[in-house]
Image: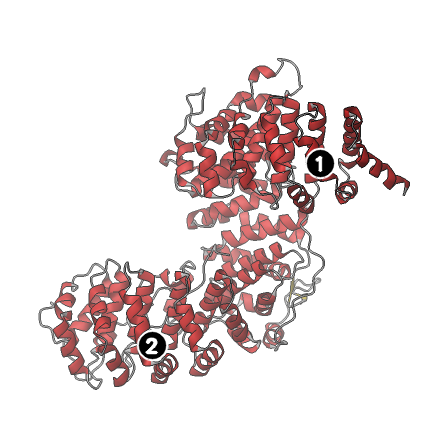
């Protein structure tokens, strides 16, 4: 009680009429709260923030008092996000912003440091910086005078320290593209570049670190600003900005190397790296980042990065650098990046487990028998499965290092099979599985990202991932308390449920269809997209009973809503789902007709094909729904033929600039004019009257070989003699396309060689083709855009962004 009374007395003294007593009270509070989280919470709980803001805002208060108040507010902000929220509620930000233009360096520096601490928190509304003249006031602080340094004195003068903190604030408030544009338009870039010259490296290198951090955030994802930086000559120098960055990436200080590498990575990712520096990513940036994986040098909070050590951030920058480049992933593999990351992960996450049990025998190092693991994998779980019990989440150094290293692994093996193999060989899978139940949701997300990258390999889906038991842990994360984890897990599940994955059965047996249907109705657009994508993949070459089960739960009206979703990507995947529902047996097509209703089904297709301007993704999927319907009975074909607008849309898209769309239209013609089917002659004549033959003949020399080959087949149905080398009519009625030994099982076809029936076109590669499995292993996760022809590679969910 005595101790509490002392602090209450200090709080009361803030209301004293004596300015000196108020100043003494603020100093007392400052001395108590700096470095003491308990005291910070005590004073904030007593309501001190509002009174301090009043004193800071009072122009009659002396400058010394206001500077002390700013220091106290900054100390509170260094506590935690809850403290920052209380400062925001007390309206502390605007008075601190006003302190930047007082002209008093002591008050300006204290105010700037407090602002930097506040803006490190997501609770801070950074938009306040862009109001009034606050941004201009902040940018003016970026001009320290070299004359402020006494020639032989180690003392650092306020203008340089203020410039450092001002650059740190810019780094933190530069969140959106609009923020970037406003800061760049206010003249910040030349002033930041001026701080990269060698004299500052000798006088006060921390100001260069802050400048690099701000520049990196300014050009993040902005081609225009990146080009501006690349083309800029550093003020007072004849050298371009990249020259100084290249020098700083070789600096002896780890933090400087990291920030220079970050800035150059951001420029590289925009595609604006000059041709004469195109190899910088391979010979300078990549090796620098790999060497920093194990560097525990502390990162100063002054430039606003919010990271505690170099080791926490270097893997993230590495991931950003390599995630979209096969060549850089190969270079990273050769530079031993994966084994170095593995060492970091194993050190932070020892005793990797699979299915809740030790995956390796501690004495022998041998994994448990595959049969035993598979029995566990297929064992039914309660529905819905209980979320794993977790300790209280934390976000300390170890968690941040583990998260960053897992994200780096996910990025480096996202495109290259050789990289995935090395991840498996490094015995990382048990540690990845263990991380799926980590208390920190960011670590769980990163572990899901790793699994998604590894699941882009058919081989891994059928062997390593099964042996590691990833099926149930991933599925359980669909019920995670964090929506971000649900999002990443649902993205990963899109690969897990492919027809050639043994884990598909695990998902089906544990209520996977029901959970995906729930997520397909989510208010979150990203979750809806992932759920529909997973259901679509689940239905690829599925048996009729699985299709019936899915549609019984999803319901046809809900599918209609998804096809009309505000998000075009969801519309595309919903049409993909419809395409797979209509692929296979005649009964499957009939189920679609009965479920949606013939009129509603055809209205959907007419709408998607007649929209202007046309969306190529929707058009492609709509055309392939028609292709699959056209493999049905005479009534199904007649329904298509009875819609003049549909037929004219097919005709119009035969001259599309997209070879994928042209190929889809030719498949429509082939299936509608199949010579052995009843009514084929009438349909052929109708298409002839509409002008299909001249268009097909004009496509005989199409630059795309798939289109060219299918055109020959289509023209043969019309008995065209104008096509050189066209196929002769066959007595057996075997489809001319089947004469090509590779045609029946290519990306676009789900038919069977020599079947003599129209060709179904499900989404993706035919899973029964070993040749196409090898092809699929080489594609990136780009959904139906992946692969070499219209049907796309197997529709596997890629990087959303989405996640």
Q: Secondary structure at mark 1?
A: helix
Mark 2 Cα shell of 10 Å, populated few (<14), some (14-19), many (≥20): few
Percent position (x, y) of residue 686? 15, 77
Residue at image location 64% in from the left, 32% down from the top: 113
Along the viewing direction, whichever of 319 and 159 lies nearer the viewer: 159
Mark 1 Cα shell of 10 Å, populated few (<14), some (14-19), many (≥20): many
Q: In terms of image quadrants, where is residue 95?
A: top right
Vertical order, 796 against 132 (above or below): below
Instruction: Tell me the tag on residue 331.
Output: none
Percent position (x, y) of residue 483? 57, 60
Q: Is residue 224 left or right of residue 29?
A: left
Residue at image location 58% in from the left, 50% down from the top: 405
Instruction: Tell me the tag on residue 600.
Output: 2
| Image marks 2 and 1: residues in contact by CB distance under 8 Å | no
Residue at image location 58% in from the left, 48% down from the top: 340
Q: Secondary structure at mark 2?
A: helix
Vertical order, 134 against 668 (above or below): above
Instruction: Tell me the tag on residue 75.
Output: 1
Q: In terms of image quadrants, where is residue 208?
A: top right
Quarter of the image containing the N terminus? top right
């Amino acid at each position: 009680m005595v101790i509490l009374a002392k602090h209450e007395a200090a709080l009361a003294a803030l209301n004293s009429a004596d300015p000196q007593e108020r100043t003494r009270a603020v100093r007392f509070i400052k001395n108590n709260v700096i470095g003491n989280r308990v005291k910070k919470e005590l004073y904030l709980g007593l309501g001190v923030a509002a009174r301090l803001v009043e004193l800071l805002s009072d122009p009659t208060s002396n400058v010394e008092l206001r500077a002390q108040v700013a220091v106290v507010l900054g100390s509170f902000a260094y506590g935690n996000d809850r403290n920052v929220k209380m400062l925001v509620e007390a309206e502390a930000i605007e008075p601190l912003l006003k302190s930047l233009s007082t002209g008093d360096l002591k008050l300006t520096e204290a105010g700037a440091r407090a602002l930097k601490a506040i803006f490190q928190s997501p609770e801070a509304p950074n938009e306040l910086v862009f109001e009034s003249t606050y941004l201009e006031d902040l940018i003016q602080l970026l001009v320290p005078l070299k004359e402020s340094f006494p020639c032989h004195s180690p003392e650092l003068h306020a203008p340089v320290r203020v410039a450092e903190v001002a650059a740190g604030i810019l780094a933190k408030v530069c969140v959106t593209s609009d923020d970037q544009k406003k800061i760049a338009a206010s003249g910040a870039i030349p002033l930041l570049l001026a701080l990269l010259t060698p004299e500052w490296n000798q006088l006060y290198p921390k100001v260069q670190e802050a400048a690099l951090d701000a520049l990196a955030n300014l050009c993040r994802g902005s081609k225009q600003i990146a080009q501006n930086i690349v083309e800029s000559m550093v003020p007072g120098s004849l050298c371009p900005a990249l020259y100084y960055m290249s020098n700083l990436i070789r600096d002896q200080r780890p933090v400087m190397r990291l920030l220079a590498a970050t800035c150059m990575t951001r420029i590289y990712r925009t595609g604006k790296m000059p041709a004469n520096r195109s190899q910088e990513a391979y010979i300078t940036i990549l090796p620098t980042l790999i060497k920093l994986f194990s560097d525990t040098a502390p990162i100063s909070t002054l430039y606003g990065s919010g990271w505690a050590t170099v080791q926490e951030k270097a893997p993230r920058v590495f991931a950003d650098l390599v995630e979209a480049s096969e060549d850089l992933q190969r270079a990273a593999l050769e530079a031993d990046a994966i084994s170095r990351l593995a060492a970091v992960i194993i050190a932070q996450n020892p005793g990797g487990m699979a299915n809740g049990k030790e995956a390796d025998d501690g004495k022998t190092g041998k994994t448990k028998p595959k049969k035993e693991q598979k029995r566990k994998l297929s064992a039914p779980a309660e529905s819905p499965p209980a979320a794993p019990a977790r300790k209280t989440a934390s976000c300390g150094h170890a968690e941040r290092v583990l998260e960053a290293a897992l994200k780096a692994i996910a990025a480096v093996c996202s495109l290259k099979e050789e990289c995935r193999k090395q991840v498996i060989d490094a015995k990382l899978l048990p540690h990845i599985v263990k991380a799926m139940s980590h208390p920190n949701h960011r670590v769980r997300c990163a572990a899901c990202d790793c699994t998604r990258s590894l699941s882009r390999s058919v081989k891994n889906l059928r062997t390593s991932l099964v042996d590691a038991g990833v099926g149930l842990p991933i599925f359980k994360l669909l019920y995670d308390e964090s929506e971000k984890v649900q999002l990443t897990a649902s993205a990963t599940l899109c690969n897990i449920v492919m027809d050639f994955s043994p884990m598909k059965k695990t998902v089906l047996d544990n209520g996977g269809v029901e959970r995906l249907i729930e997520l397909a109705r989510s208010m979150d657009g990203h979750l809806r997209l992932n759920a529909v994508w997973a259901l679509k993949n689940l239905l690829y070459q599925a048996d009729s009973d699985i299709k019936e089960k899915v549609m019984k739960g999803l319901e046809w009206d809900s599918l209609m809503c998804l096809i009309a979703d505000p998000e075009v990507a969801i519309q595309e995947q919903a049409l993909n789902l419809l395409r797979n529902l209509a692929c296979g047996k005649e009964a499957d097509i009939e189920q679609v007709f009965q479920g949606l209703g013939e009129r509603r089904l055809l209205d959907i297709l007419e709408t998607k094909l007649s929209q202007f301007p046309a969306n190529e993704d929707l058009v492609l999927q709509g055309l392939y729904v028609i292709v699959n319907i056209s493999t049905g009975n005479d009534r199904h074909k007649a329904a298509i033929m009875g819609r003049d607008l549909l037929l004219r849309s097919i005709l119009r898209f035969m001259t599309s600039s997209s070879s994928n769309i042209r190929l889809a239209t030719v498949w429509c013609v082939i299936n509608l004019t199949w010579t052995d089917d009843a009514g084929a002659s009438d349909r052929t004549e109708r298409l002839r009257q509409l002008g299909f033959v001249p268009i097909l003949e004009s496509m005989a020399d199409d630059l795309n070989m798939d289109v060219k080959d299918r055109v020959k087949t289509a023209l043969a149905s019309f008995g065209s003699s104008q096509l050189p080398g066209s196929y002769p009519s066959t007595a057996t009625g075997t489809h001319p396309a089947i004469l090509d030994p590779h045609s029946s099982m290519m990306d676009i076809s789900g038919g069977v060689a020599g079947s003599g029936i129209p060709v179904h076109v499900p989404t993706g590669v035919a899973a029964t083709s070993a040749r196409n499995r090898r092809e699929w292993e080489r594609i990136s996760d780009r959904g139906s855009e992946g692969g070499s022809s219209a049907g796309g590679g197997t529709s596997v969910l890629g990087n959303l962004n989405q996640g």
